[in-house]
Image (cartoon, helix red, strand yellow):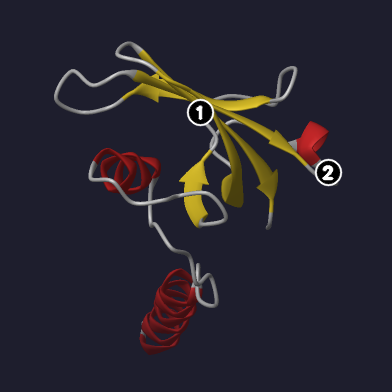
Amino acid sequence: MRKTLCILLSVLMLFLMSTGLYGCGKDTDYPSVQAMYQAHKNGEDIIGKTVELMASHDYYMGQIFYGPMPEYGPNVSIDVTGDGVENIKEEDQLVIKVTKINSDGQFAFSISAELVD
């Protein structure tokens, strides 16, 4: 019983340490696509800034993220370039650097970016 409890505590500690360290060292300008969009909407220049995001789907013809913003905002589309982009899968955690705003309309907000991480 005591040995099992010791093993269980060891596994739990390893799990907590690994989840606590996940993402360490990722120093980004915006912690999410929503924060980036809000900053742009507030007049900030987002070109050259970094964003942490989760791919909404597998890489397909450049696109890695597509989805609506909160409060009935426009749909955001992110196209990315860089080494290894074709290996991006849905729910991969990524860091990108915004290179260009392609459209900033009422119903769509599209950006181009480079893969950083």
Residue 13 placement: quadrant: bottom left
The spot of residue 113 in percent (x, y) is: 64, 41
The spot of residue 9 in percent (x, y) is: 38, 82
Q: Residues within 10 Å of mark 1 (few under 14, many from 20)?
A: some
In the rendered image, the residue lying farthest to the right is 83
Residue at 14% across, 25% down = 71
Residue at 45% across, 49% down = 46
Q: Specify the label residue 32 is tagged with.
A: none
Helix, strand or loop under label 2: loop
* Separation (CA) of disc 1 from disc 2: 17 Å
Residue at 46% across, 84% down = 10
The spot of residue 45 in percent (x, y) is: 41, 51
Q: Specify the label residue 56 is tagged with.
A: 1
* 50 over 20 or under it: above or below: above
Quadrant including the N terminus: bottom left
Residue carrying label 2:
84
Q: Residues within 10 Å of mark 2 (few under 14, many from 20)?
A: few
Q: Amino acid at mark 2?
A: Gly
From the viewer's perspective, is 81 left or right of 10? right
